[in-house]
Image (tube, rainbow, N blue to C red):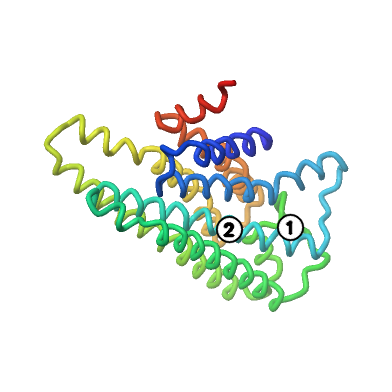
Amino acid sequence: MYLITVLRNLLIILAVTSDSHLHTPMYFFLSILSLDDIGFTSTTVPKILLDIHTHSRAISYVGCLIQFSVFLTFGCMDVLLLSVMAYDRFAAICHPLNYPLIMNPRLCVFLILLSFVTSFLDGQLQVWMALQMTNFKEVEIPSFFCDPSQVLEVSCKHTLINNLFKYIIATIFGFLPILVILFSYYKIISSVLRMSSSSGKYKTFSTCGSHRSAVCLFFGTSVGIYFESAVSHSPRNSTVSSAMYTVVTPLLNPFLYSLRNNDLKSALSRLYKP
């Protein structure tokens, strides 16, 4: 499953970079998302495979902090990239004539750098927050990796502070991106409904189908686990939710984006030809 995830995402990156027809903002963001998904799943799955091979679930103190920080960086960037991609679709559908000017290469690169820097700073902030609370060198985390919600749970003695911090992070990287996505889709739907042609409505709105599926899959699990961990203490539910957005989501994203995308399917088929 891990190899399929990595190879499928690498194929999308290769298809986008090698085909000049895909050198557009939408596919540029998609290739960055694929790269992010590789890093996201590589943060946890290789360690899981090693644990299965060695029959040991132990992780060093430094290793846990690194996994904790890198996981947050890739995870938060995934959220921000989905928001950026929603804005890109809004610009393309609602302002088609000005789209090349709006989504110019400089803005695209700036949005990617902003997403990365924001995600990196969030990862460092949460690591610092965990370290300020207490020392968790010899504790057991009820998950298959250093899950941020579980690490904060065991490292924080004050439940109120822990829950408050979770809600703040969930608001910044959950509610606000969802707000951007919902606003973008509100404008997209309004623009599509004003079209006179039924086929035009379907064709235009279908270009957002893969993105909608990816948004529902990612936000439905990643945001839910933060709220679930704040009100519930079920390790099993937390582990299932964690597995969904750390393993299943990066695996399904390439299929979601290539399944009904003829341009991407054509580019991928050309890669397979000798």
At mark 2, the secondary structure is helix
* Location of mark 2 (residue): 229
Residue 160, horizontal then vertical, whole percent: 57, 74
At mark 1, the secondary structure is loop
User: Real-space Cα distance between discs 2 and 1?
Assistant: 13 Å
Location of residue 197 (image quadrant): top left
Q: Mark 2, residues whose alpha carbon is within 10 Å: few (<14), some, or many (≥20)?
A: some
* Location of mark 1 (residue): 141
Mark with earlier residue (2, 1): 1
Residue at 43% over, 47% down: 215
Q: How many labels were placed on the picture?
A: 2
Residue 151, horizontal then vertical, whole percent: 69, 63
Relative to 191, does residue 176 appear above or below in the rendering? below
Relative to 17, does residue 36 appear above or below in the rendering? below
Residue reaching furthest to the left: 196
Relative to 218, does residue 163 appear above or below in the rendering? below
Query: Amino acid type of disc 1?
Result: Ile
Residue at 14% over, 44% down: 194
